[in-house]
Amino acid sequence: MVRPLHREFGIPASVIKPLVKFMVSEGVPLNALLADTNITLNDFALSHHTLLFEQYINLILNARNLCQKSEYALILGEQFFINHDDLLSCRVLSSDNTRSAMELLTQYQNLFTPLLDLNFEVNANQGIFYINEKIPLGDALPHFIEYSCSLLYSLGKFSLGKKDIAIEFEFSHPNPGHADEFENFFNNSVRFDCAANRVIIPQKTLQQAIIFSNKNTALENEKICQQQKAHINSDQRAIKLVKQYIRSMPFHEISLEALAHKLHMSQRNLRRHLQEQGVSYKSLLENERKRIALRHVEKQDINLEQLAELLGYHNASSFSRAFKRWFGVSPNHYMSYSPLNSLQKPHESVQPQTWVS
């Protein structure tokens, strides 16, 4: 489903591209979309490149403010379902009915996304599927709620072989546009400013059989899902420890060999754990450098020579080149910007270019 994302990890540029492509196709100026994100055009051209979670959040906030289609996240969720397939989707498709499918989603929610917490309750009249943030997402939370509901609704329609499903949606955030835009998309009731983010599923829908149901396939998919869940838990623990060690060690002492030694595993096994979560040792190290660099450059609390030494660079020139590669401008240029003057922010001077993926 949704690729693993976490505030502590890098966000693959491939996760961000669909949002950027859609916004540009809707006429949103690229320079306005990237404003205040420190994302450069080069970030999208590099393979296996990652960005900071905060950059991703700022991009989403820009998208919500700039896009004329308030239901854009619903469209993106539907497009993701159409263009992707994964293990959890296969497990859901092989289950017996809607109720068992919803229970599976809560059981294997880490295979869906680590950003959201999913809970499912059933009473005499209906089932209620709750969606909450697992880590603070701030004003970007509506994006993830709408996107996830759209993706799950698309999966549900396909699972039941129906054009529409009788369910209701309740969102805790204000209506970003017109109610009919969301109700037309879901062909169901959609309410905003509610007490919780939830999907209300009547008993009749819960009992509907999934057309792909197959006991043998379900058993095989269940076994693989359990293995994948165990792998993710193990890999996430490894990444958390790698982050802790990176933050506790001087940068000039950090290496894959040193980290593997501290974790009591081989370099090969450590590399595998990281790759299975869509990250690498180099991307984790670079993201930590970017985070520290941006913090100190914005505060201007130490000079560039000291910052370069702190981050493990030979000199200020080497650090400045890395900073420009990360954020599109030199640290001196970045520091020269003041919100009180009339100058544009450095990244706002980038002109829109033809998008090529």
Image (cartoon, rainbow, N blue to C red):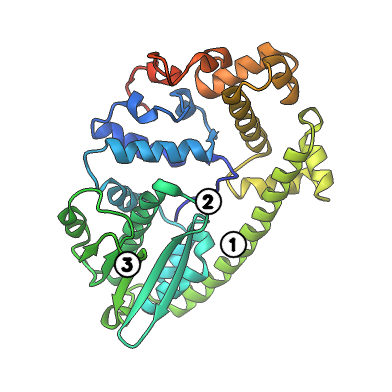
Q: In the visual, does 289 lie left or right of 151?
A: right
Q: Image point 65% across, 46% down: which residue?
A: 274
What number of labels is visible? 3
**Label 3, residues with CA under 10 Å away: few <14, some 14-19, many ≥20:** many
Identify the disc placed on residue 4: 2
Inter-mark Cα distance, 1 to 2? 13 Å
Secondary structure type for disc 1:
helix
Percent of width and height locating residue 139: 39, 47
**Along the line of sight, the residue nearer the viewer: 32 or 337:** 337
**Along the line of sight, the residue nearer the viewer: 46 or 352:** 352
Q: Is residue 12 something that shows in the picture?
A: no
1 and 3 marks in contact (CB < 8 Å)? no
**Label 1, residues with CA under 10 Å away: few <14, some 14-19, many ≥20:** some
Identify the disc placed on residue 202: none
Amino acid on which the number 1 mark rests in the picture: Gln
Q: Which of the two marks, 1 or 2, is nearer to us in this view?
A: 2
Disc 3 target residue = 156
Where 211 falls versus 252 (above or below)?
below
Disc 1 target residue = 228
Q: Earlier in the sequence, mark 1 or mark 2?
A: 2
**Along the line of sight, the residue nearer the viewer: 95 or 295:** 295
Amino acid on which the number 3 mark rests in the picture: Gly
- Which residue in the rendered view is the most extreme toward the bottom? 124
Q: Image point 26% across, 69% down: which residue?
A: 168
Secondary structure type for disc 2:
loop
